Amino acid sequence: MSYAKLYWIHALTPLHVGSGQGLGFIDLPIMREKATSWPLVPGSSVKGAWRALVAAGKHNELENTIFGVPGESEGHAGSVVIGDANIAFFPVRSLYGTFAYVTTPLVLRRIQRDSKFAAPEELTLPDLEMANNEALVSDDSCLQGGGRVYLEDLDLNAQASQGIGELAERLAAWIFPGDDNAPWRSLFKQRFLVVPGTVFDYLTTHATEVVARIRLDENKTVATRALWNQESLPAETILVGVLWCDRVLSRQNGGLSPEELLDTVFHGEWPAQLGGNQTIGLGRVRCVFGAGREV
């Protein structure tokens, strides 16, 4: 039997996983999905970061089993499939509560679909219907004032419900497990916000972090044509992906089952660095692995 589990990436600093040279005013844009234009982190980037951690850690004897070995004669594919990390919650500046963890019904339904495949229990969703000028908040939300939510230059009518609060609690338990993360579960629930798809599209396009970067020459002045704009996902962005194993491909560890391999290595919480600009503090993340299930 195959074995799968969800993983979460929580950006602790701005995160830049680039897509190359841009065509607009942003010279170095982030990676985005083709169909939705929502931000993502490719599975290949996640795989590279995790391989470095496994190779340097206590499970280094399993590195080649998990990630594969190059070469025609002795090489083999990796046993673990690491899917892309897609946007789950996008942090947006708020007049009340400082910032909001913003999502949209389509994102939540995609998480629900993945939970059927890779989580012990399917994520249950409440009624997510809303008008184009409304937003759904938990019953103890700190984001609303006078029945309204103010995000960047947008304002929406706040609709509070117990069902949204219960959904936020369920997701917070997955993203912030353990007693040490209890304050973050409360913070997440109070700042959990569901907005219409058009609003989410606008925010994930126009509320990313764009910084002007320069390169200095030997005289400590800006080098010729060395000014560029770089886009990053803001700190507190949360993404979600799926990893699974169909069979263990290895000559050394062939006795392991897919469940044993994933549960031995991919559990708990990992600190990691993803994307570019590591030396200036970008890309520091925490990776959280959920419980798995047979598929």
Image (cartoon, rainbow, N blue to C red):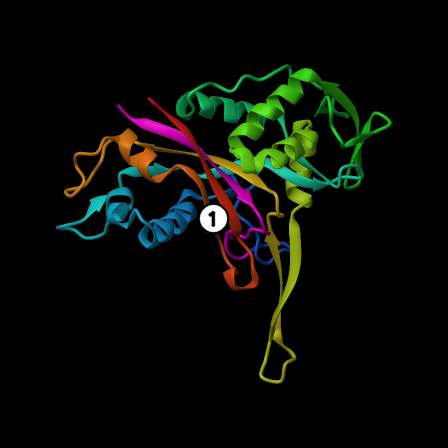
Residue located at (31% from left, 52% from top): 55
Percent from the top left, x then y, of residue 20? Answer: 50, 55
* Quarter of the image where one finds residue 156: top right
Percent from the top left, x then y, of residue 42? Answer: 45, 44
Q: Nearer the viewer, residue 275 or 65?
A: 65
* Quarter of the image where one finds residue 291: top left
* Quarter of the image where one finds residue 158: top right
Percent from the top left, x then y, of residue 69? Answer: 23, 49
Instruction: Say left or right for 196 vs 120.
Output: right
Q: Secondary structure at mark 1?
A: strand
Query: What residue does disc 1 label?
Result: 271
Q: Is residue 43 above or below residue 127?
A: below
**Quadrant housing the N terminus:** top left
What is the residue that sits farthest to the front in this orientation?
A: 179
**Quadrant housing the C terminus:** top left
Q: Which residues are magenta?
A: 1-21
Residue located at (33% from left, 33% from top): 263
